[in-house]
Amino acid sequence: MLGRFARDYESPFSRQLMLACRQGDVVWDVGANVGHYTASFSDWVGLSGKVVAFEPDAMNLPKLRSACGQRQNVAICAFGLSDKTERRSFLGDGGDGTTSRVLQPGEPAPKGAVEVELLTGDDVIQGGRADRPNIIKIDVEGHELSVLKGLQGALSDKSLRNVFVEVHFGVLDRSGRADDPKRIEDILKRGGFKLSWTDASHILASRPA
């Protein structure tokens, strides 16, 4: 797992993440999992910066806290982001740091599913639970569009320079949401971002200078 992840830092997506971060930035790690990117963000933004790690999976939280909880510039939020502030069914990965996802409305809840707290990103900001981000990374196993819908205010804020999104085509196709990638592109463009795909599944949205 760690070896594969270490190699992944040579990928175009990971390199662009590193290049985007500046000392003093506020970075939101949406879908922090067990904290691999969170720890790197912490190093890249320095002690003058801040990393806000969002992770609703209770099984992943101990590893996330072990990896990043002692870092002075990391805040861990034990909830996820969505287009509504509500509780939703969630299927975790058992704490192995692989995949976990929010279940869609009407989707049968398999054995092991639990309820988790979800908030909109805009509610998080307005409620004072996190500073406005300069960079957002989203990796939420098919819930990307819902996260972006809950960030309308943040997306229009000029202090947000970059949004990085992993688009999970397989999950979207299997759940009848094959049009979500286009809708994700549209919502980012409406926020004033220029888009590029760093590879077949990762979007880099950059605000023109």
Image (cartoon, rainbow, N blue to C red):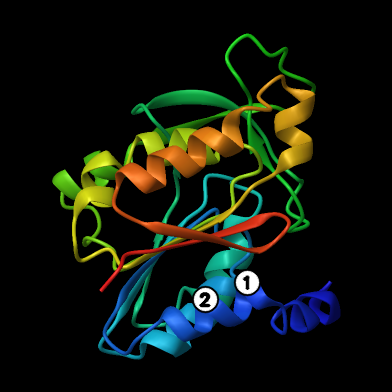
Asked if residue 151 is positioned above or below residue 91 in the image, the reply reads below
Rendered-image quadrant of the N terminus: bottom right
- Please give the name of the residue rendered at 43% of the width and 35% of the height, measured from the top-left corner: 82
- Residue 21: give its label: none
Rendered-image quadrant of the C terminus: bottom left
User: In the figure, residue 130 lies in which quadrant?
Assistant: bottom left
Crowd tier of the residue under label 1, counting other residues whose Cα lies within 10 Å: few below 14, some 14–19, many 20 or above? many
For the residues labelled 2 and 1, the Cα–Cα distance comes to 6 Å
Query: Between residues 83 and 188, which one lies in front from this camera angle?
Result: 188
Query: Between residues 105 and 13, which one lies in front from this camera angle?
Result: 13
Q: Is residue 127 left or right of residue 165?
A: left
Q: Residue 186 at x, y = what percent?
A: 43, 39
Q: Tell me, yes or no, whether the two marked residues, 2 and 1, touch with CB atoms within 8 Å.
A: yes
Query: Between residues 143 and 123, which one lies in front from this camera angle?
Result: 143
Q: Is residue 67 left or right of residue 129?
A: right
- Please give the name of the residue rendered at 51% of the width and 24% of the height, measured from the top-left corner: 88
Local SS, label 2: helix
Q: Is residue 111 left or right of residue 184?
A: right
Q: Residue 157 at x, y = what percent?
A: 19, 55
Query: Mark 2 — residue?
Result: 17
Q: Is residue 5 left or right of residue 41?
A: right
Query: Mark 1 — residue?
Result: 13
Inspect the image, locate mark 1, and give the three-letter code of the amino acid beneath it.
Phe
